[in-house]
Amino acid sequence: MSVISEENVRGGSVFKNISADDEDTQPTEIESLCMNCYGNDLNREVVKSDSATTRIPELDFEIPPFTQKGSLSTVEGLLDRAVAGLEQDQAVRRAADPEVAEKIDEFIQKLRKLKDLDSEFTLVIEDPSGNSFVENPMAPQKDNALTVSRFKRTVQQDKQLGLRADDDPDEPAADDLEAMRNEVLVFNTNCPECNAPASTNMKLVQIPHFKEVIIMATNCDSCGHRTNEVKSGGATEELGTRISLHVTDISDMTRDVLKSETCSVLIPELEFELGMAALGGKFTTVEGLLKDIKDLTVSKNPFICGDSGPSSQMQKLIEFGEKIDKVVAGEMDIHVILDDPAGNSYLQNVYAPEADPEMKVEKYTRSFEQNEDLGLNDMKTEGYQEDN
């Protein structure tokens, strides 16, 4: 409990003696704190370490790191300390450079006016050591006026804190995991079409609401052949995944699709089924997947080229290609079903994180035959050393 003395507070006594003979008695006004909203932000406690940078963007004001010692204060105390620092050498400045001293006086007045709260301002404390703190008077509830964000230190900040030697290179090490996530790896290979030397680009990509995948793309400068392949960045899931999308609008063509090499594709309305590994792993869109299916079954089918294929079979495939074109144009509704026993395929939910009314995702237990196809029946991951 705090005790307020009746000695001079802000130049006078807080309370006056009550007297019936005093006709000039007026209500006494004192500063207080609202216990409902904690409406005095200047009284917030602030822990500022030596390495912290303090900024007030509205005034373009900044206190660089390591120019003040660490302190435990309040927002008002930080402002007072800044004013005191600027006033420290004003007497010398007025004699040496009156114009500069006058500008500093004007800036000091701006800092002092902040304490009147006539206008809002932002106090930013950036501390690479993570040891600074601003009080949340509404804890454990959220404080809408306070934002706390975390960031990764730069190499230069590590050097300032003494966590790295001064002669360490400014660039992170090549085997840094985070650096590798943002880097495109390139390795030499041969073109699968003409066997000419080519290069393959590989990158680790995080798919929102799913997992990490590895995307590899090859571009041949000799024949112009391009190909891309997607590999799962994780292990085989415990359960298989079956995703069914009811395509009702042309906008569904833009949904992202990750089809792993173990995923089969079914389109019941077209009586079509594509087995696993037929198209390999792909990261594309629904439209891109349908066009790849058309290319595989119609455009690039070697058994219907020229006079080698029966006319009846050629006609069926041509009609199938025309139906695919209608679906892509939004003229035909279908269901696209991705059935992946490994659980590593994905179809974008445009309503995420809410449920998608046109999409159904099912998890199921793999059959013995599916585990056999994935090579899991003969795989032993525990106690394998006992057999040796």
Image (cartoon, rainbow, N blue to C red):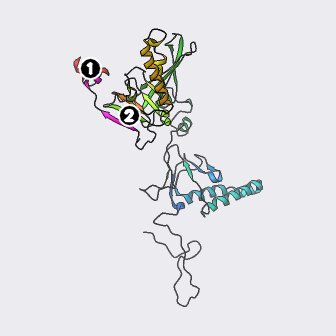
Q: What percent of the width, then of the height, locates residue 295?
A: 48, 20
- Could you tell me which residue is drawn at 34 percent across and 32 percent down? 241
Between the residue at mark 2 and the residue at mark 1, the CA separation in whole angstroms equals 31 Å
* Front-most of residues 109 and 88: 109
Q: Which residues are magenta?
A: 357-372
- Could you tell me which residue is drawn at 58 percent across and 76 percent down? 12
The amino acid at mark 2 is Ser
| One can see residue 229 in this view | no
Residue 378 tag number: 1
The amino acid at mark 1 is Asp
Q: What percent of the width, then of the height, locates residue 208?
A: 45, 36
**Is residue 230 positioned above or below 123 on the image?**
above
**Is residue 257 positioned above or below 70 on the image?**
above
* Front-most of residues 13 and 313: 313
Q: Is residue 296 left or right of residue 83?
A: left
**Residue 222's quadrant in the figure?**
top right
Q: Earlier in the sequence, mark 2 or mark 1?
A: 2
| One can see residue 373 in this view | yes
Q: Residue furthest front?
A: 312
Q: What percent of the width, then of the height, locates residue 299?
A: 49, 18
Check disc 1 and report its element: helix, strand or loop: loop
Circle 2 residue:
244
